[in-house]
Amino acid sequence: MGKKGQAAKSVGIEGIELPSKLCDDQNCPFHGSLRVRGLILDGILTKFRATRTGVVEREYLYYNTKYKRYERRKSKIHVHIPACLDVKEGDKVIIGETRPIAKSVSFVVLGKSR
């Protein structure tokens, strides 16, 4: 469980820097008991208005077999944002899949992307 003043632990993914701030969020992969498993994606944080919850929009290519070409598609993913991370709307972020935190939230922000 996350305790105040506890040092940040690694999430086991290369390229993810540990946050300098501390937090007492139980759903923080660095200071709490939340495990990151499954997909690792990146996208742009488009909304950060709810408490510790935001929306990441990611763009990807889909191959359309009928027309034999790629088309650009977008998807919106609801994410949990730990208090120890300094991210704001418009930032490019890396997100990781976790157990379900809420009805529509199964991803957590791991940090800013370069």
Image (spheres, helix red, strand yellow):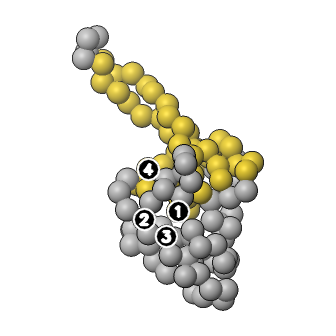
Say whether residue 13 is visible.
yes
Kind of residue at badge 4: Leu
Sequence order check, earlier mark of 1 and 4: 4
Q: Which mark is residue 110?
A: 1
Task: Single out the mark in the foreground, 1 or 2.
Answer: 2
Q: Tell me the crowding category of disc 3: few under 14, some 14 to 19, or many 20 or more residues within 10 angstroms, Cα based.
A: some
The quadrant holding residue 67 is top left
Q: Tell me the crowding category of disc 4: few under 14, some 14 to 19, or many 20 or more residues within 10 angstroms, Cα based.
A: some
Q: Which mark is residue 41?
A: 4
Sequence order check, earlier mark of 1 and 2: 2
Sequence order check, earlier mark of 4 and 3: 3
Dot 1: element: strand
Are dots 1 and 2 in contact, CB under 8 Å?
yes
Residue at point 50% right, 75% down?
33
For this view, does 85 lie left or right of residue 105? Answer: right
- What is the spatial separation of the Cα atoms under label 3 and label 2, in whole angstroms? 7 Å
- What is the spatial separation of the Cα atoms under label 1 and label 4, in whole angstroms? 10 Å
Q: Which mark is residue 34?
A: 3
